[in-house]
Amino acid sequence: MSSGNDVGQTRSGEQPNLTNVAERIGRGVSAALVVGAFFIALAIYERPGPPRFQAFAVGNEIVRIDTREGAIIACQAGQCMNVRHRGQDLVKELPQPGPAVSPAATNTQH
């Protein structure tokens, strides 16, 4: 039986002091922060991103591009080859071909 005097007492029968109350609140807030940070990290990790591979077809050739690494693979008739490797630089300008020599010009020089 309990008397009407036990308002504000804990199970052990002692009065809660300010230190105990502050410690409980601190534990609750820190636990809530840890759980909240976990859910935020999980949401960032699991968010949908762009697809890793893109592919398209040109005639009877299929080209696959790895969008993360930049590698390009082309396949035709069951044979595949690497068009561009990871980390390979692309040529900024194609080499200009020299002037074409016409067959008539070579005949007149003889």
Image (tube, grey):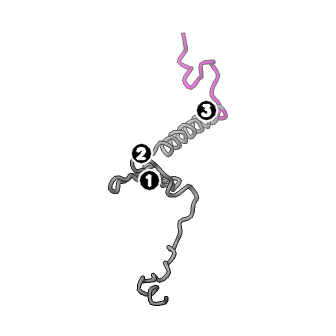
Q: Label 2's element? A: loop
Question: Is most of the magenta stretch helix, strand or loop?
Answer: loop
What amino acid is labelled 3 in the image? Answer: Arg
The residue that label 1 is drawn on is 74
Earlier sequence position, callout 2 versus callout 3: 3
Residue 78 in the figure: left or right of residue 3: left
Looking at the rendering, which quadrant does residue 7 occupy? top right
Q: Position of residue 19 (x, y in %)?
A: 67, 34
Q: Quadrant of the N terminus?
A: top right
What amino acid is labelled 2 in the image? Answer: Gly
Instruction: Please give the name of the residue rendered at 46% of the width and 83% of the height, measured from the top-left corner.
Output: 101
Q: Residue 1 versus residue 16: which sits nearer the camera? A: 16
The label nearer to you, 2 versus 1, is 2
Q: Residue 69 versus residue 64: which sits nearer the camera? A: 64
Mark 1 surroundings: few (<14), some (14-19) or many (≥20) residues within 10 A: some
Instruction: Please give the name of the residue rendered at 42% of the width and 83% of the height, measured from the top-left corner.
Output: 102
Q: Residue 38 versus residue 100: which sits nearer the camera? A: 100
Q: Does the magenta segment cover residue 44?
A: no
Q: Is residue 68 above or below residue 29?
A: below
What amino acid is labelled 1 in the image? Answer: Ala
Q: Which residues are magenta?
A: 1-19
Q: Is residue 88 above or below residue 108?
A: above
Distance Cα–Cα, label 1 vs label 3: 63 Å
The residue that label 2 is drawn on is 78
Q: Are marks 2 and 3 in contact (CB under 8 Å)?
A: no
Distance Cα–Cα, label 2 vs label 3: 68 Å
Q: Label 1's element? A: strand
Q: Position of residue 61 (x, y in %)?
A: 37, 53
